[in-house]
């Protein structure tokens, strides 16, 4: 919750392709600002220690842990959330593969998994199963397990190459 005497700063960034300005508390994490200040609730707050991957967002084209980055650090950057990646269709093959391979259950980890997998496939369109596992090693899933997720990423990679 914001406190009236808490120091704030003005930030300007591109959020999901749209120029955005906001006044943010200096100590507010990027993921909290996205969720509570912008209503973009696709990225989740999990461990708040940077180990679970639920808070992933892209900043200037790289996946970052939104719980470890302050909103003020996003000033002047391009931020893309799972909502933005979905709207552009950039992750459609991954979303389809996750659905078709039953690679999601509760969905809490799924946005982070999708963004991390998309970053992998952009850099390596034909990753091995070991490379997929390594790329996703910073994302925890407590429901689905990792076999179906790795299968889905492998299937999406094949679909994107076809």
Image: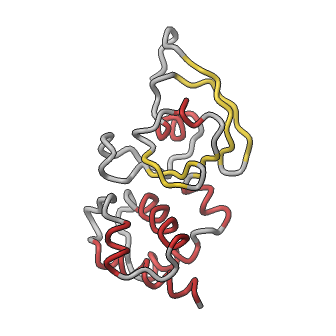
Q: Nearer the viewer, residue 7 or 5?
A: 7
Say left or right for 160 vs 54: right
Residue 117 image point, x, y percent: 46, 68
Q: In the rendered image of this protein, does residue 41 appear above or below residue 24? A: below
Please report the residue visible at 57 percent of the width from the left and 25 percent of the height from the top.
24
State the image quarter where residue 101 is shown: bottom left
Front one among 95 and 117: 117
Please provide percent x and percent y for residue 132.
37, 74
Q: For the N terminus, which image quadrant?
A: top left
Residue 161 location, quadrant: bottom right
Side of 153 where 11 appears, left or right:
right
Pick the residue in front: 51 or 38: 51
Q: Give the residue at x 49% y 13%.
A: 6
Measuring from the top left, give residue 146's x and y in whole percent: 29, 72
Residue 150 lies, with reference to residue 76, above or below; the image says below
| Residue shown at 70% from the left, 37% from the top | 20
């Amino acid at each position: 919750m914001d406190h009236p005497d808490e120091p704030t700063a003005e930030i300007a960034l591109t959020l999901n392709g749209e120029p955005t300005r906001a006044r943010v508390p200096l100590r507010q994490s990027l993921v909290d600002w996205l969720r509570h200040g912008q209503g973009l609730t696709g990225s989740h707050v999990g461990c708040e220690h940077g180990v679970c991957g639920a808070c992933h967002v892209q900043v200037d084209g790289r996946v970052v842990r939104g719980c470890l980055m302050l909103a003020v650090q996003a000033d002047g950057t391009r931020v893309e959330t799972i909502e933005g990646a979905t709207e552009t269709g950039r992750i459609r093959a991954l979303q389809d593969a996750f659905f078709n391979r039953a690679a999601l259950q509760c969905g809490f980890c799924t946005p982070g998994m999708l963004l991390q997998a998309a970053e992998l496939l952009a850099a390596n369109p034909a990753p091995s199963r070991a490379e997929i596992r390594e790329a996703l090693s910073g994302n925890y899933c407590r429901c689905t397990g990792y076999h179906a997720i790795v299968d889905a990423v492998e299937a999406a990679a094949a679909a994107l190459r076809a």
